Image (tube, rainbow, N blue to C red):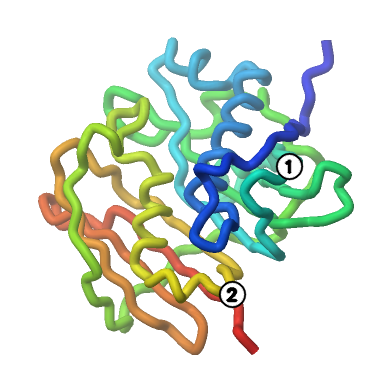
Amino acid sequence: MMLPTVWNEELPIRYADGDYYRRWKLGGLFQTLQECATRHALNLGRGYDQLIKNDLAWVLSRFLLRIESLPLAGEQVKIETWPKGLQQKLFFMRDFLITSPAGDKVYARASSAWLLIDTHTRRMQMPGVLGNSLPDNGGRFALDETLDRIPVNGIDLREQFAVQARPSMLDLMGHVTSARYIEWVMDCFPVEAYREGVAWLQLNVNHEIKPGEHVSVASGQSGDNTWIIAGTNQDTSAEAFTAAMGFNSSE
């Protein structure tokens, strides 16, 4: 049987995932994309349930989202996702396209980079461990961009809040879920900042946060319409994550 190299799902946006302006919260959007990717990986025989038997697991390393317009809570959307080969001979790349059910309106495009790790040592595994078992979809892309490091040097980052990793924040790997990082990024700004909506967002996950550890979340402006956000593990001094975000102009 031919396995689908491109995965499609149509679903409603939960009202619980609507923000103050009724738009799809980026945290909810991010979680939905992850769930779709997880189901596709399972269908391809390389999902959590299959990999964990060999002490392997996927971890998100980088994520880039570019938004044309966000749908509203209660509306239906279609999500397409597919693997698109390797980046830097290291990252497993996967793209996403979010549209109306008919496909005639594009809401957002995203690209993501994943690493394969040993669940015991937490060390990265080389792509060759999986052989050629994932399709690369012949150069098909939603975003034709390289997901690079986010520069933080020279940015005046000021702490917005500090938080301790608690049980509700953890995922199957026993560390803070990357979806929570998205929520922390959003919480750096007041409600009014989202009146015109977010234009784009990049998240880079650098080091895991374990239960009980403390994180300082700071933000600062870089250029006219770019904000840099960084989460620092106060227990290890490691940079847990960095993010960059731009808002739509009110003009």
| Residue type (three-letter) at the residue carrying disc 1 | Gln
Q: Which residue is mark 2?
A: 196
In this rendering, the answer to whether 224 lies above or below 1 is below
Q: Residue at x 68, y 54 (%)?
A: 71
| Residue type (three-letter) at the residue carrying disc 2 | Glu
Quadrant of res 123: top left
Q: Residue at x 55, y 59 (%)?
A: 147
Mark 1 → mark 2, Cα distance in angstroms: 22 Å
Q: Secondary structure at mark 1?
A: strand
Instruction: Specify whether 129 is left or right of 84.
Output: left
Q: Residue at x 76, y 41 (%)?
A: 78
Q: Residue at x 44, y 10 (%)?
A: 53
Instruction: Specify whether 118 is left or right of 197.
Output: left
Q: Which mark is residue 76?
A: 1
* Quadrant where the C terminus is found in the figure: bottom right
Q: 10 Å neighbourhood of mark 1: few (<14), some, or many (≥20)?
A: some
Give residue 5's position: percent from left, percent from top. 77, 29
Instruction: Specify whether 79 is left or right of 1.
Output: left
* Quadrant where the N terminus is found in the figure: top right
Q: Secondary structure at mark 2?
A: loop
Q: Is residue 73 visible?
A: yes
Give residue 75's position: percent from left, percent from top. 71, 46
Q: 10 Å neighbourhood of mark 2: few (<14), some, or many (≥20)?
A: few
The residue sitting at the left extreme is: 235
Q: Is residue 113 visible?
A: no
The number of discs equals 2
Specify which label sits upstream in the sequence, 1 or 2: 1
Front in this rendered view, residue 83 or 249: 249
Quadrant of res 55: top left
